[in-house]
Amino acid sequence: MNVNLDSPSPDDDIVTPFRVEGTDVRGQLVRLGPAIDSVLSQHNYPSEVSTLLGEAMLLTAMTGSSLKFDGRIVLQTSSDGPISMLIAEYTTDGAIRGYAKIDHDRLAPILAGDNTKTSHPQPSLGEMLGTGHLAISIDQGPDTELYQGLVALSPESLVQTALTYFAQSEQVLTSIRLSVGRHIDGDGRQTWRAGGIMAQFLPPKDAGRETTDRSLDDWERADILLASTEDHELIDPTLSSDRLLYRLYHEDGVRTFDRKSIRFGCSCSEDRLRSLLAGLDPADLSDLEEDGVIKAKCEFCSTEYRFDPADISSA
């Protein structure tokens, strides 16, 4: 379908696939409202951490929404910095979740700007995450082999890290714009919002078909236009996805396809955690016991489970 400039707004928690007409440029526009606010508000991370986790969730939704099978995709950073881990997970039924592992004692001076290595007011990705890698894992189910791609973390941004991944692992020309921030409504209530666009150069794989100079020119123009997107446009609740895409690509024309809904969803369960605890050594299990009860908390949704040690040992 062509873009609908009269579509209702806002269109939160939606992935909108699109194609720039007459070109080999395709992409996804992701708008997150309540889904990302559910994650970031309940964790109450420092705003810099929330922004990074929001970017990771956007990247995961962008990549996962294009999968043609039932499964899940996990984006995970592992590094030696004060934010030692970011995890974002998207399942192909539209559920998304995420969390960050933080050493608050190490992170606090960096965010305060009194770290001797900090020469600018805003801490860099390298200062917060340190040195490490980004892993993108794609799971198609129990009867298939898990795919995992690894790329070194860029000290610049998660976007630059993702672009390196697509260039090296997928060998696809890719452009990405992301924005994560708080929105204040008319009643003064603050909520987290996020938006992002990923465009890719995907010429048909016809035998004998060569990429022409014109098609590459089309890509370069689409890349330049995407780079012109402003942060506030990506998270503006009054600007519909169709209208934003029209602003960018109206000269060539843009076509959107069936949208996919996103929601916050966590797959944790009492039975799953009980099975995990049952696999621990008795000594480790004993260390978790407090006042005759073993407590386990899901890092994604913050749900706390309580177990009788006798039930665990007999599981």
Image (cartoon, rainbow, N blue to C red):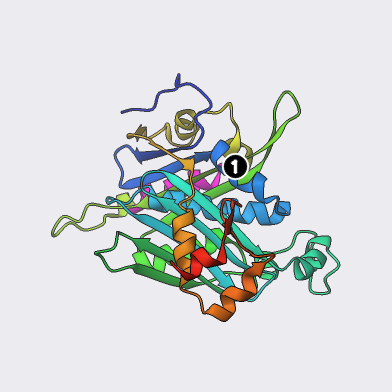
On-image quarter of the N terminus: top left
Which segment did they paint magenta? Answer: 216-229
| Label 1 element class | helix
Nearer to us in this view, 95 or 223: 95
- How packed is label 1: few (under 14 Cα within 10 Å), some, or many (20 or more)? some
Q: How many marks?
A: 1
Question: In the orientation shown, which residue stands out farthest toward the right?
Answer: 114
x%, y% of residue 273? Answer: 49, 61
Could you tell me which residue is drawn at 49 percent across and 30 percent down? 11
Q: Can see residue 58?
A: yes
x%, y% of residue 233? Answer: 59, 36
Q: Is residue 301 above or below residue 19?
A: below
On-image quarter of the C terminus: bottom left
Relative side of 162 to 143, left or right: right
Could you tell me which residue is drawn at 49 percent across and 37 percent down? 13
Could you tell me which residue is drawn at 36 percent across and 39 percent down? 18
Q: Is residue 296 above or below residue 281?
A: above
